[in-house]
Image (cartoon, rainbow, N blue to C red):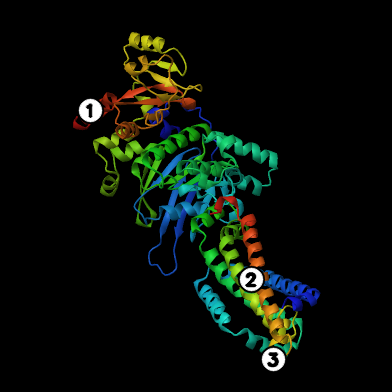
Amino acid sequence: MSETLSARPSDAGSGDRRISGVPIRLEGVTKRYPGQDTPAVDDVTLEIAAGETVMFVGPSGCGKTTLLKMINRLIEPTEGRIHLGDEDVTDQQPDQLRRRIGYVIQAGGLFPHMTVATNIGLVPKMLKWDDARVKERVDELLDLVGLDPERYRDRYPRELSGGQQQRVGVARALAADPPVLLMDEPFGAVDPITRQRLQDELIRIQEELGKTIVFVTHDFDEAVKLGDRIVVFDVGARVVQFDTPERILAEPAEEYVADFVGAGATLKQLTLTRVADVDLQQPTTAAVGSDSAAAVAAAQAAGDDYVVVLDERGRPISWPSLAELSRTSTVPDTVDQRLPVVGLRSTLNDALDTMLAASQGGVVVTGRRDSVAGVMVVETVMAAIQRTRTQGAG
Amino acid sequence: MLDYVGERWGLIAFQSFQHVSLVVQCVVLGSLLAVALAALVYRNPTATAAANGFSAVGLTIPSFALLGILLAPFGFGITPAVIAITFYAALPVLRNAVVGLAGVDRALVESARGIGMSRMSTLLRIELPLAWPVILAGIRVSTQMVMGIAAIAAYVLGPGLGGFIFTGLSRLGGANAINSALTGTIAVVLLALVLDLLLVLAGRLTTPRGIRV
């Protein structure tokens, strides 16, 4: 486990990370549907460590979703055993079992006739928590997924954007603090920028909670970004390769994997490097309402030609050029909707995407609680590409 | 006509109450039966087809004929009237309930099962509330329909406004015959409109805000 984690440069030094997950062990799990010659899932044996994020990837119809749904027994396995921690749960009462396993599907699977709070509180209510505790937990979870409880608690799902619905879906899955989280292509239905934000959020949440996560996706970039390890499946849920993203890209086990993941492509390597791993520039910052002239002077002293404006909670809201800023007396509070922002855990691929989407030559990088961690410029990405090219050639 | 109504106001009011009471009780009973039946069949394509066929064929049976048939085992009185009206009340609700339940997004049902809701609580807390607007539309249709059918129940000496209509029709040409039949008919129409209004109101109050259109 520690080996797997430390294989990722970005995980170095996070060995003391809290783990609240339990291992999952699948033994010879098979699913046969009546009237079909070949099993949908054929004799799969897998060990997933506690606190690990494992991504299931493979072509559609390969049985990866079927395998996922057998873990919480939405689909009953024909053969084989499933263990959570030390427990064999293959014959456990499925409803009881599922209350201990978080489950997230595309678009969150929120119930449209219930408020956000009711949706999130469903599992705790089923576990007979008292109302005060449920209410407290709902607010805590909304906070965790980055939604203001006061504002969102009593809304209905249709009053939320796709990304917000998905956050609530994650909050609902985490409600009773289950050790295991199953995610079935959860971010498939949102736009790329929102998806990237949600992925960053998930990484942050997972760093905080250390659940055991099994995540099905058809997007290999997503798998590389989120996964500690990736399982590549072929038809019948045959495990072709089960390894870290780095090793799957560097040494694909079969031609099939190489084709599927597009290994060797230079730009793929960008998904392996996190924004936190490269050198960031420290921009000049100014708080909303402070003196513009002072901010301009500070920026000139530092050799910058722009200033990152922070709101009262320290979050970046715009980055006016010095020319723009010097036309004002105090720093304006206008929010630049197109301000390109990525998290520290985003990949260089995300950062490049964001820059291109905003037609900017750089992105603001945010760390804890959305505070500014620095600025990354397009040259940094280019340098990274150049580096992998030379490595590839040599 | 006005004199006629004025002289019999007490009786008209009493029969109107009887009529509405009969209809409401039969619709409630019929709806409960229909929803229960729909919940049993909607997951099974064969059973769903059978239920839909049943409700289609059932609606083609003339109410007069059904009442006649029910006379043999049950005799005159309230029993055959209640059975016939409940039968007709159930049919539109059955059809709509099947459609409504089948129309609930499968992903939501799976999501409910996936977070550990039992089969029963998924039905009660997720599927029925989401199908409710469609079921309620069925209840409105069935209420309108059985207001008329309940009038015919007077044939088997059931309670309600049908008595005025049948009395009038049987004495056609006699004094007040037309008045009697008209009074019964108009009262049925007016009460049907009032009931429909109440159902619309009930729909507003019982449809969760999140799925109101």
Q: Are marks 2 and 3 on the same chain?
A: yes
Closer-to-camera residue (A240/B181): B181
Kindly identify the amino acid type of the residue bearing the numbered disc 3: Gly
Q: At 66% across and 70% down in the image, what residue appears? A: B190
Q: At 52% across and 70% down in the image, what residue appears? A: B44
Q: Secondary structure at mark 2?
A: helix
Image spot of residue A314 (x, y percent): 48, 21
Closer-to-camera residue (A329/B14): B14
Indicate whether A272 appears above or below B154: above
Which of the two discs, 2 and 3, sits closer to the camera? 3
Kindly identify the amino acid type of the residue bearing the numbered disc 1: Gln
Q: Which mark is residue A386?
A: 1
Q: Residues within 10 Å of mark 1 (few under 14, many from 20)?
A: few
Give the mark, 2 or 3, whose residue is nearer the N terminus: 2
Circles 1 and 3 in contact, beta carbons < 8 Å: no
Kindly identify the amino acid type of the residue bearing the numbered disc 2: Thr
Which residue matches tag 3?
Answer: B173
**Letter of the chain that mark 1 sits on in the rendering:** A
Q: Residues within 10 Å of mark 3 (few under 14, many from 20)?
A: few
Indicate whether A214 appears above or below A283: below
Image spot of residue A260 (x, y percent): 29, 47
Q: Is residue B8 visible?
A: no
**Letter of the chain that mark 2 sits on in the rendering:** B
Q: Which mark is residue B143?
A: 2
Which of the two discs, 1 and 3, sits closer to the camera? 3
Indicate whether B177 appears above or below A226: below
**Letter of the chain that mark 3 sits on in the rendering:** B
